[in-house]
Structures are given as C-alpha cells and as structure tokens.
Amino acid sequence: MLQLTNITKSFGSLQVLKGISLTIGDSEVVSIVGPSGAGKTTLLQIMGTLDTADSGSVIIDGTDISKLKSNKLARFRNQHIGFVFQFHQLLPEFTAVENIMIPAMIAGKSQRQARQRAMELLDMMNLSDRASHKPAELSGGEKQRVAVARALINNPSVIMADEPSGSLDSKNKAELHQLFFDLRDQLHCTFVIVTHDEQLATLTDRTIHLKDGEVVDIDDAVPVTDVAPSPDTIPTSDAALSPDASDAALSSDTVLPLDSHDE
Ligand SMILES: Nc1ncnc2c1ncn2[C@@H]1O[C@H](COP(=O)(O)OP(=O)(O)OP(=O)(O)O)[C@@H](O)[C@H]1O
Ligand SMILES: [Mg+2]
C-alpha cells in the first residue's frame, strides 16, 4: 500500500504540489491525469522516491521513505518500485534480456537467476524470440514491453509509469494498456500511471485528477464488468522526466555487473 500525506513541493517560488494526500491500495491500477504543468510528473517522482517532497510523508509497504538515507533508499527503490517511462530508457549496448536482468543483478541475484526470471518475463510479454536483440532492433511497442519486464524483475509491489504509452501508435498503445491489467491480475502489483490517454484513464480502477498542484477530483471506475479491455501498450519514458531517468529505471547508481559476453 502507498500512502501520501500532505505532500508539498516548490521549485523556487513556484508551488507545484499544494498538499496532496492519497492512499493507493494493493493491486490497484490508478491513473493520474491533468493538464500539462499540473504537477503529475513531480508527484510521481516523489511517490517513486526519485525526488523528495518539501513536507508531508510517503509511506510504501509500511516504510516511511523520507526516513531512509540514500543507500537504503536506493535499495528500497530497487526492491519495491518499478519504473516505466515515456521513452523506454533501455541501454543500447545490452540485449533485451540483459536490460531486463540489470535491476536483478543490482539486487544481488546471480546471473543465472536473473537470466531465468528475465526469460520468464519476456515470455509473459510474448517476446521470447526477441531476447537477444538490442533495443535498436526492436519496435517501439517491443521496447516498451521490455521496459515493463525490466520494471517487474525484482517483483516490486508498485509500478510507476509516466506517460508509458505516450510514444506508441494506437495498436501498441492498446496492447501495452492491456498488458498492465494482465500483469495486475497475474502478479498482483499496483500500477500508478500518469497518462494523457483518456481511454486508459477510463479503464483504470481510479482516476486522480490533478490541477495546479491539487487533487481536484477522484473518479472511481464505473463497474467494469463489461468494458472490453482495450489494450494499451506501454512505452517507457520521458527523457525530460528526470535527469536521472535511466539511473532511476535501473534503480541504482551501481556499476552494472553484467559480463560482456552473452551466454
Ligand atoms: N526541476 C524543476 N525545476 C523547476 N521547475 C520545475 C521542475 N520540474 C518541474 N517544474 C515545474 O513544475 C510544474 C509541474 O511540472 P510537472 O512536470 O510535474 O508537470 P506535469 O503535470 O507532469 O506536466 P506534463 O503533462 O506536461 O508532463 C511545471 O510548471 C514545471 O515547469
Ligand atoms: Mg509530466
């Protein structure tokens, strides 16, 4: 469970978040929507421990993250949170499977364990046959699915995605969005998704509307029993999202421990 209490954040004289309180339950898929500049990315970064609030608290899985020092925070992030950005932020010199393995290696898993789990995740994404391809050899939708697999490898309790389908065409978008719901059902993880995609927002369990740094509305989903799952595909990241975006995706500053050869 993720609990935000009275989060404020200013950049200079600009108050971007004006006291946000939210509770997001386990296995919930929540969307955050609102106009450009509303503070969505800032809020997601604070929730995801990539940025700090000026005041207020963020509690994830019972841990008050504002009390963690940087090493413990990096470890916590690596083990509890997965990130997907608008642009995939995959490392170009590594293959799909290696990119997925990296957060597991940082977490101390053996190369064998990391590869095995990465291959399972690739299989879930229907990408087994792309495992040894580098990002430049993958389509946009495939890269985003690899980025989702990378976000999942340490079995995080929550995946945070900032406009994950923002760079995809409608078919890949739909596939990525559907993937989120399939993963929630299979892995029981929570998804917090910043999106401008209205169709995705209508599919999520709750939509949080942010405007001028405040929550102005929260929509509970209409009972969705007969809503056709419209697949959405997820692209990973917004290069502008954070100067540390690729580090964040890796959840650590640690030097990559991968061997240069492929097994
Ligand atoms: N590091 C920063 N320094 C100064 N101002 C910032 C910084 N990051 C964001 N801002 C400002 O804070 C406000 C909120 O930005 P944020 O990125 O959270 O908006 P957003 O809702 O994600 O918008 P978009 O939909 O365009 O991505 C904007 O006015 C932005 O210019
Ligand atoms: Mg943004």
Image (spheres, rainbow, N blue to C red):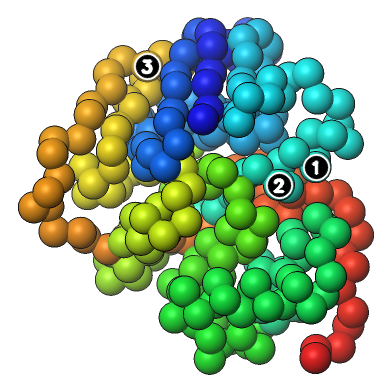
Secondary structure of residue under mark 1 = helix
Residue 103 in which image quadrant: bottom right
Q: Residues within 10 Å of mark 3 (few under 14, many from 20)?
A: many
Q: Is residue 205 visible?
A: yes
> In what element is the residue under mark 3?
strand
Left or right of residue 89, residue 41 in this image: left
Looking at the image, is mark 3 or mark 1 nearer the viewer? 1
Q: Are marks 3 and 2 in contact (CB under 8 Å)?
A: no
Q: Tell whether label 1 touches label 3 (CB within 8 Å).
A: no
User: Which is more toward the observer, 78 or 108?
Assistant: 108
Residue 160 image point, x, y percent: 53, 43
Q: Residue at x 61, y 54 (%)?
A: 155
**Which residue is labeled 3 in the image?**
215
Q: Which residue is mark 2?
A: 79
Which kind of residue does numbered mark 2 sit on? Gln
Comparing 229 with 246, the one in front is 229
Q: Nearer the viewer, residue 230 or 17?
A: 230
Marks 2 and 1 close (CB-CB < 8 Å): yes
**Label 3 vs 2, first from the N-terminus:** 2
> Label 3, label 2: how many angstroms apart (C-alpha)?
29 Å
Q: Amino acid at mark 3?
A: Val
| Residue at 31% over, 15% down | 216
Instruction: Report x, y in % for residue 16.
Output: 53, 17
Which quarter shows the C terminus? bottom right
Which residue is denoted by mark 1 in the rendering?
75
**Residue 52 in sight in this render:** no
- Residue 2 picture location, percent across and down: 53, 28
Q: Secondary structure at mark 2?
A: helix
